[in-house]
Amino acid sequence: MSYDLVIIGAGPGGYTAANRAGQLGLRVACVEKDPTLGGTCLNVGCIPSKALLHSSELYEEAREGFAEQGVKLSGVELDLPAMMKRKAKVVTTLTRGIAGLFKKNAVEWVKGTARIAAPGRVAVTDPDGATRELETKAILIASGSVPIELPGLAFDGERIVDSTRALELDAPPNELVVVGAGAIGLELGSVWRRLGSKVTVVELTPGAVPGMDREMAKLLERALQKQGIKFLFESKVESAAVAGERVTLTVRGKDDATKELFADVLLVAVGRRAYPDLLGLADVGVETDARGRVVVDAHYATSVPGVYAVGDVIAGPMLAHKAEDEGVACVELIAGKAGHVNYDAIPVVVYTYPELASVGITEEQAKADGREVRIGRFPFAANARAKTMGRIEGSVKMIADAKTDRILGVHILGPQASDLIAEAAVAIEMGASSEDVARSTHAHPTLPEALKEAALAVDGRSLNM
Ligand SMILES: Cc1cc2nc3c(=O)[nH]c(=O)nc-3n(C[C@H](O)[C@H](O)[C@H](O)COP(=O)(O)OP(=O)(O)OC[C@H]3O[C@@H](n4cnc5c(N)ncnc54)[C@H](O)[C@@H]3O)c2cc1C
């Protein structure tokens, strides 16, 4: 049997592309080496981390926040096995949901590890070791990424762990040291701090969440410090020695002095690397860059005709929604339609409390590009809904072009920033001006009113500050 499209990998890039291909009437197979569909995001990424963030936030609130709201609880206890069981159930429900969507869209789920034998031929080794070849008009690589391991800090799955293992610890560590102050490090650090761990984050650069707007990142750092997370910036873990249940770390700080830190668990969360490792790309001539990412053109085509790639395995932010939208665009282009991704309107979220969400350019980028901008800010402390919720930390920052007033970037630190950023992403996608948002009626009292107020503030006419 011959296919129109064989997709390698069933993460957000691969499974979304597969479903879209099915909708478009292509004969499509999706090869996945792991036992469940959904890839990193559903199995060991976005979904289990958000389940634990939600549960741990409720636990902390029940312990410390409810009394203030007039809700008295006694005997709040952590039942970590139940929390983990719930997380696993959420994951299973969603991964099974993908299998259901595959059926609905006539996508064939091929279980096994794929290698590109030649353009138009994918060799699959199934879990029992048997190999067969799939013939296809096009191949889409969506093989994703894996955690980066640092020299001298090899993962042992117990004391020195990656994000996957940090999602399933049996008990909160007394001392958790996190290497890397990116989204994953801060989210998992927050989970375990809420559940009782002392958390120290060691970061090479001068601040948390490098790449995000510095003013907002600084506010997030302060909020997390207030919660008890310690940061060591401009610091590097030089070595780690495991003895029994303890890891001793040598950390070199910005003054060039070294100091020792102790941890029962060391989480290395310094990013992920593209994972085309099992595909035999060199043998078929698919070009990769210096960081091992598959090189593609604007239509996701690789250097070999008929072979395409999307998601974490190519350049760009490693985000589930970026992978999904690329998967859809790539398949539409293969089918002769006009697929497109607007890379200026991809939101990025750090799901800490408060959440930090961002879309478009930062103030630093505007300066670096020599763009003249006007900036509006509005704090949640002046937003009525935030007050009723007792969640007033953070603010909204809107960056607009000084001449055209077009919105170039929006950065939100605050409650439900992950949801609020959607309005900003749509505004940027539609080419809206700050005036457009300022003149759109927002329901009262709601958190999105803070966005409207930031838009008004771009023109110096915020009404509630
Ligand atoms: C802890 C954590 C939290 C995260 N949280 C978020 C978040 O909140 N929001 C967000 O947007 N992103 C988040 N991410 C990132 C997100 O998970 C990735 O960006 C996303 O999963 C990338 O999708 P993908 O389809 O490109 O690759 P993946 O999801 O990595 O999927 C690739 C799939 O390909 C399979 N595969 C690889 N090689 C082969 C082969 N040779 N044969 C067959 N199958 C193969 C793999 O088994 C895997 O299932 C998080 C990641 C982590 C680790």
Image (cartoon, grey):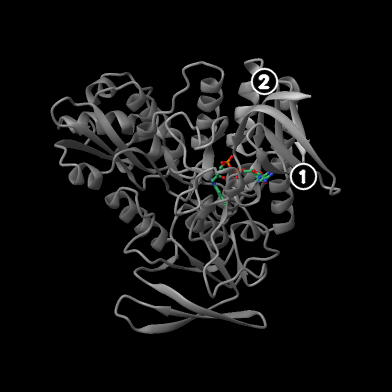
Residue 201: x and y in percent read: 45, 66
Amino acid on which disc 1 is placed: Pro
Mark 2 lies on a secondary structure that is helix
Is residue 254 positioned above or below 141 on the image?
below
Q: Is residue 320 above or below residue 63?
A: above
Q: Residue 256, located in which quarter of the rendered image?
A: bottom left
The quadrant of the picture occupied by the C terminus is top left
The residue that mark 2 highlights is 22
Q: Label 2 near label 1: C-beta < 8 Å?
A: no
Label 1: which residue?
35
Rendered-image quarter of ligand 1: top right
Q: In the image, what residue occupies the spot 44% across and 56% down?
A: 182
Give amino acid for label 2. Answer: Gly
- Distance between the Cα atoms at labels 1 and 2? 22 Å
Q: Is residue 116 shown left or right of residue 336?
A: right
* Quarter of the N terminus within the rendering: top right
**Mark 2 or mark 1, which is nearer the start of the sequence?**
2
| Nearer-the-camera pick, 187 or 438 | 187
Q: Position of residue 441 (x, y in %)?
A: 32, 18
Left or right of 183? Residue 146 is right
Q: Say which element carries label 1.
A: loop
Label 2: how many residues lie within 10 Å, few (<14), some (14-19) or many (20+)?
many
Kindly tell me whether mark 2's CB lies below 8 Å from ligand 1. Answer: no
Nearest-to-viewer mark from 1 and 2? 2
Residue at figure coordinates x 55%, y 55% from the top left: 60
